[in-house]
Image (cartoon, helix red, strand yellow):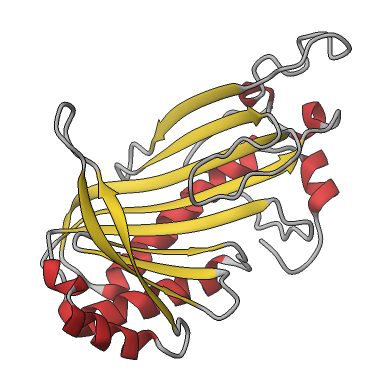
Amino acid sequence: MDTFSFRRDPPEVMLKEDPLKRVLCQVRFSANPELIDDDHEIKLASELRDQFPVRNSVQGVALQLFGTTPAVQRLRTFEDIEGVWKVTVAPDFVAVETSRYKNRDGFLAQLSGVLAALGSVSAPALVTRVGIRYTDQIEMSPELADWVNPALLGCFGHVDAHNVEIQNQVITALLRNRRSGSAVQVRSLILPGGAQIDAGVEPEAFESWVLDLDSAVEGREIFDVARLEGTARDLAHDAYRVFYWAVTDEFRKAFRGGGTS
């Protein structure tokens, strides 16, 4: 297998059989509590109505330091009619996610629209983190050894499959781009049927292999929609570089087609 490098630009391969369960982009920023008050929610809903007309208000748990009590904060959500796109707005972040990802340009266009709406209602002063996460999941198969880079398979292929079942396996690595300072958190998981990756991804009944890629950069930058879209595009491309390295030509042949990247 080839060694991985962020300098390599692999070809864009379109996949027909879609292994993607969810794509999510989160932009974290300095505290902006007025974003979720009733008046600003009404204004934001008006800006997002064409794409995300379904509104809701939920309670979320904010991450706290070890030894402190988790804080419950109010979240505003906006969804499309089909329920395949969702926007979540909190006092310190906005997230856009979909279970029906078509291509990078389409996803980034939706993200830009949401950021522009947010900026027109109450632009945050400072952005502190941008991350984009791709979660792929496929049913376990004997072909997995031919489809996936051995570096991500661990025990798979090295135990007697007739009398040994791998109940679960997690391989993690944090790959940092030395040039940009961004990083991709890589998780390769083997999960039993019914296991849930996280609350935002519905569990599958079958045993599966999951590739979870979280491409992110931290720092301080102003809230500028064009710059943020560019950052998200770079992060998405880094995640794709890892994905291309993680799977083989046999995988691409098995899943290749038109319509989904």
Q: Would you say 28 lies left or right of 164 here?
A: left
Q: Depth check: 189 or 231 in front?
A: 189
Percent x, y of residue 43: 24, 88
* Residue depicted at 24% across the width and 62% down the height: 74
Taking 194 as reference, is 107 above or below it? below
Q: Depth check: 42 or 233 in front?
A: 42
Quarter of the image with the N terminus is top right
* Residue depicted at 60% across the width and 50% down the height: 202
Taking 150 as reference, is 206 above or below it? below
Percent x, y of residue 249: 78, 41
**Quadrant of residue 14 within the rendered picture:** bottom right
The residue lying furthest to the right in this view is 162
Q: Would you say 205 lies left or right of 92 here?
A: right
Percent x, y of residue 253: 84, 48
Q: Is residue 59 visible?
A: yes
* Residue depicted at 58% across the width and 28% down the height: 3
* Residue depicted at 55% across the width and 50% down the height: 201
Percent x, y of residue 196: 57, 39
Quarter of the image with the C terminus is bottom right
**Quadrant of residue 96 within the rendered picture:** bottom left
Q: Is residue 7 visible?
A: no
Q: Would you say 84 lies left or right of 207 here?
A: left
Q: How many marks do you count on the picture? A: 0
